[in-house]
Amino acid sequence: QPQDRPQARSTGERVLVLIKPDAVQRRLTGEILRRIEAKGYELVALRVLTPDAATLAAHYAEHVTKPFYPGVVDYMTSGPVVAAVVAGQRVVEGVRSLMGATDPTTAAPGTIRGDLGRDWGTSAIQNLVHGSDSAESAAREIAIWFPELT
Ligand code: GDP
Ligand code: MG
């Protein structure tokens, strides 16, 4: 139990976060983790790796047939990502709120994507960060990126 947050409770709610290759290349890993930690969430697992096509196809199962998916593969395999499991009450909602909307050009200022992202004219939308969109997605994605946790 964290000593500096006497009301904090461990609920077991978890989310998968990916700090995408553009963010790692731009040295924004620390800034993004800082925002997640400063919000009050707990980092429970962290790994640096360059994803392979099979991992991405599992992760983005809902998108593999979409026209933009080849661009997503090029983007997401272009360099290392930082994968994290983050925990806390309502953390799925909270991380989605911190991230902002998918398109960084119009994502709200104050969010990670809104403050730090832009359109670079690339085929995939480069938007710095991934966060699971539901508790069910989080469980499925954590099993892909951190099989040892499940
Ligand atoms: P997210 O949950 O906000 O990351 O958005 P989605 O789950 O809808 O999409 C997954 C990722 O695919 C996004 O973060 C983008 O990198 C990319 N993407 C989504 N929609 C589009 C699109 O319409 N065009 C392109 N080029 N990329 C997209
Ligand atoms: Mg998504």
Image (tube, grey):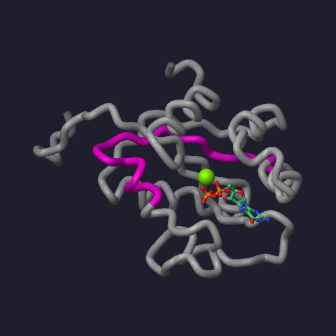
- Image location (x, y in percent) of residue 119: 74, 77
Instruction: For ligand 1, give the image quadrant.
Output: bottom right
Rendering coords of residue 146 (x, y %)? 58, 27
Q: Is residue 25 above or below residue 138?
A: below
Residue 19 or residue 57, whichever sits in front: 57
Task: Give left or right: position of 128 versus 66.
Answer: left
The quarter of the displayed image where residue 59 is located = top right
Give the mark count: 0
Please report the residue visible at 58 percent of the width from the left and 56 percent of the height from the top.
Answer: 29
Residue in the picture at 48% in, 81% down: 109
Spot the residue most to the left: 6
> Residue 84 magenta-drawn?
yes
Vertical order, 99 against 21 (above or below): below
Depth check, front residue: 9 or 37: 9
Look at the picture and state if 132 lies above or below 148. Answer: below
Residue 59 shown in magenta: no
The location of residue 57, given as percent across then percent down, is 78, 37
Q: Is residue 125 above or below residue 56?
A: below
Residue 110 image point, x, y percent: 44, 77
Say left or right for 23 vs 51: left
Q: Please report the bounds of the magenta region as a residue range.
A: 77-96
User: Residue, x 50% and y 19% (percent of image)?
Assistant: 150
Q: Is residue 132 or residue 75 the one in the foreground?
A: 132
